[in-house]
Image (tube, rainbow, N blue to C red):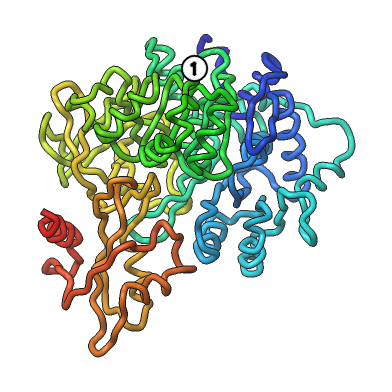
């Protein structure tokens, strides 16, 4: 496809495939299937519902629920309306959901029946949230998306000038915002990463232009999205599948037995998962019986693959493996460890990968100077897919994106072949089975317990999940609290995956002369104790 004929917006992508392959399944989830013609039609109807609710260009529209065909339908409806999709992690507590919807000024929220109580709880205190629509039509006492679509009258709205990607009048040009993903930061509060349409096109186009098959798409491909849609990995891979005219196969939530069954019944050819998910799938009895035999490529991210896991996967699956590295701030995958480097025993298995065409990586010292090959510093990425910025946080944006370079918060080095090796984290972030966890948010929550004087939260290596959350706690004089007390206290205040799974108690926390907690000292001490 030439550059001039490529679609450059999400709206244009679906319109194109609805014309080219109208009867091909576009998305499959929980027993429901929408063809490309139906996805185009239903996203148009949902866009009309959004407009009737007062949504216009730049309005924020939230989604709180597990994966469903309506999630992808809503993403393209927002693109049609010029609105911005705000996907909310359904594992968060009501307090955490409240912050995201409040900060984003979400006006309309789509929610599944399971999470309707949370939506009802937070709506009371949110002045901007005018409308809550339930996905399930038969939920008593709740306004439903299906009912609103059913009440529409008149002919479908024309695609208009914006459908070809020029964005005239509709706020849907390739540089217009279309998604706002929330990711935590060192401040402890989630920040809204605003992404434009272009974030979902640049990487695939660069690979096509350079003849690379790292993330290739073949006719008839069916892609399992094991990572959730509120995660940049799941959202980006899903959109790349739609861009290629493939079929997206979603799981309402990742359960290893369901994933194996769906791969077999839907004849899935490519999948994106975290390494922990892949390990759980290989443990399923059906995997040994050939249930995963349709796979030709497994894409994974969040942490490197262990050599033992790779050996087992190669023994069960006759397919290629591909590691991706990026962040919400880079807007898409930035580096890749190609299939050719997935050789048992190869030192490259410990690398994050090398940049996609058109993307640059460099290592900087604390003063912003570029470091030579082999020296460890902060990883910085320059990519045309990067975020527009953090929502209403210009100072935080300026700290993360400097002269076009996204500062990743990882410490690493480049080898002589240009492969990135990540050695540590500059910002102390913990990754639990692909979920980003930030220590300060947990430390602040622990500090609200009346018996806690202070806490230092760190990540510990975990064989299955990559890392687990550990808290070192200092109690107030004369106060008592144990691990179970703290666990019960945090439930309902933090999402389950953020709650520490282990604790130790100390008289004091290591600090530098200015009083800052030295989490690295805690990690080093715990590592020495483990040998």
Question: Residue 530: which quarter of the image?
Answer: bottom left
- Residue at (81%, 42%) from the top-left corner? 149
- Residue 4 location (% of width, % of height): 54, 12
Q: Left or right of 356: which side holds 109?
A: right
Q: Is residue 136 above or below residue 487?
A: above
- Residue 67 location (% of width, % of height): 59, 43
Q: Left or right of 373: which side holds 30?
A: right
From the viewer's side, name the closer residue of 113 and 95. Answer: 113
- Residue at (61%, 49%) from the top-left corner? 63
Q: Is residue 191 above or below residue 164?
A: below
Question: Residue 297: which quarter of the image?
Answer: top left
From the viewer's side, name the closer residue of 118 and 329. Answer: 118
Question: Dot 1: what SS?
Answer: loop
Number of numbered labels in the structure image: 1
Q: Left or right of 406: which side holds 215?
A: right
Q: Is residue 467 above or below residue 34?
A: below
Question: Residue 171: which quarter of the image?
Answer: top right
Q: Residue furthest bottom?
A: 478
Q: Left or right of 159: which side holds 529?
A: left
- Residue at (15%, 68%) from the top-left corner? 511
Q: Is residue 13 above or below residue 465?
A: above
- Residue 528 location (% of width, % of height): 10, 57
- Residue at (56%, 47%) from the top-left corner? 86
Question: Can residue 483 be seen from the camera position used here?
Answer: yes
Mark 1 burial class by Cα count in 10 Å: few <14, some 14-19, many 20+: some
Residue on which disc 1 sits: 217
From the viewer's side, name the closer residue of 319 and 301. Answer: 319
- Residue 238 location (% of width, % of height): 53, 31
Question: Can residue 170 be seen from the camera position used here?
Answer: no
């Amino acid at each position: 496809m030439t550059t001039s004929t490529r679609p450059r917006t999400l709206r244009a992508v679906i319109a194109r495939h609805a014309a080219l392959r109208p009867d091909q399944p576009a998305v499959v989830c929980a027993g429901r299937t929408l063809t490309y013609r139906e996805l185009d039609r239903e996203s148009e109807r949902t866009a009309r519902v959004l407009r009737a609710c007062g949504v216009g260009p730049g309005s924020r529209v939230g989604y709180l629920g597990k994966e469903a065909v309506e999630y992808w339908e809503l993403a393209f409806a927002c693109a049609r309306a010029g609105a911005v999709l705000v996907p909310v992690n359904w594992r968060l507590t009501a307090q955490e959901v409240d912050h995201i919807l409040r900060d984003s000024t979400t006006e309309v929220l789509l929610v599944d029946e399971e999470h309707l109580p949370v939506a009802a709880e937070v709506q009371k205190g949110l002045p901007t949230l005018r409308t809550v629509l339930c996905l399930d039509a038969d939920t008593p006492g709740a306004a439903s998306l299906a009912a609103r679509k059913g009440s529409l009258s008149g002919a479908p709205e024309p695609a208009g000038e914006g459908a070809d990607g020029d964005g005239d009048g509709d706020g849907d040009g390739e540089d217009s915002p279309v998604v706002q993903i929330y990711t935590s930061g060192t401040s402890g509060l989630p920040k809204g990463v605003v992404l434009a349409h272009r974030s979902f096109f640049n990487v695939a186009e660069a690979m096509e232009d350079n003849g690379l098959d790292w993330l290739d798409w073949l006719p008839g491909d069916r892609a399992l999205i094991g990572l959730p849609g509120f995660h940049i990995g799941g959202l980006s891979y899903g959109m790349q599948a739609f861009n290629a005219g493939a079929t997206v196969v979603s799981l309402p939530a990742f359960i290893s037995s369901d994933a194996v069954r769906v791969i077999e019944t839907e004849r899935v050819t490519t999948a994106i998962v975290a390494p922990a998910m892949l390990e759980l799938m290989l443990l399923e009895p059906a995997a040994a019986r050939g249930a995963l035999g349709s796979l030709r490529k497994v894409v994974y991210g969040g942490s490197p693959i262990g050599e033992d896991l790779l050996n087992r996967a190669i023994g069960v699956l006759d397919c290629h493996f591909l590691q991706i590295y990026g962040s919400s701030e880079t807007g898409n995958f930035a580096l890749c460890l190609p299939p050719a480097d997935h050789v048992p025993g190869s030192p490259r298995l410990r690398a994050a990968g090398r940049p996609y065409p058109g993307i640059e990586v460099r290592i900087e010292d604390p003063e912003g100077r570029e470091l030579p090959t082999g020296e460890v510093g902060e990883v910085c990425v320059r990519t045309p897919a990067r975020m527009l910025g953090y929502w209403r946080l210009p100072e935080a944006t300026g700290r993360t994106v400097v002269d076009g370079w996204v500062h990743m918060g990882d410490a690493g080095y480049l080898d002589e072949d240009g492969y990135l090796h990540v050695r540590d984290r500059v910002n102390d972030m913990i990754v639990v089975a692909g979920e980003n966890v930030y220590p300060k948010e947990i430390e602040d929550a622990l500090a609200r317990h009346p018996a806690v004087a202070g806490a230092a939260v760190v990540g510990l290596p975990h064989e299955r999940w990559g890392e687990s959350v550990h808290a070192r706690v200092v109690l107030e004089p004369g106060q008592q609290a144990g691990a179970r007390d703290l666990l019960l206290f945090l439930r309902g205040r933090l999402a389950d995956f953020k709650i520490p799974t282990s604790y130790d108690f100390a008289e004091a926390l290591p600090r530098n002369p200015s009083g800052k907690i030295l989490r690295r000292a805690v990690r080093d001490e715990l590592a020495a104790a483990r040998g």
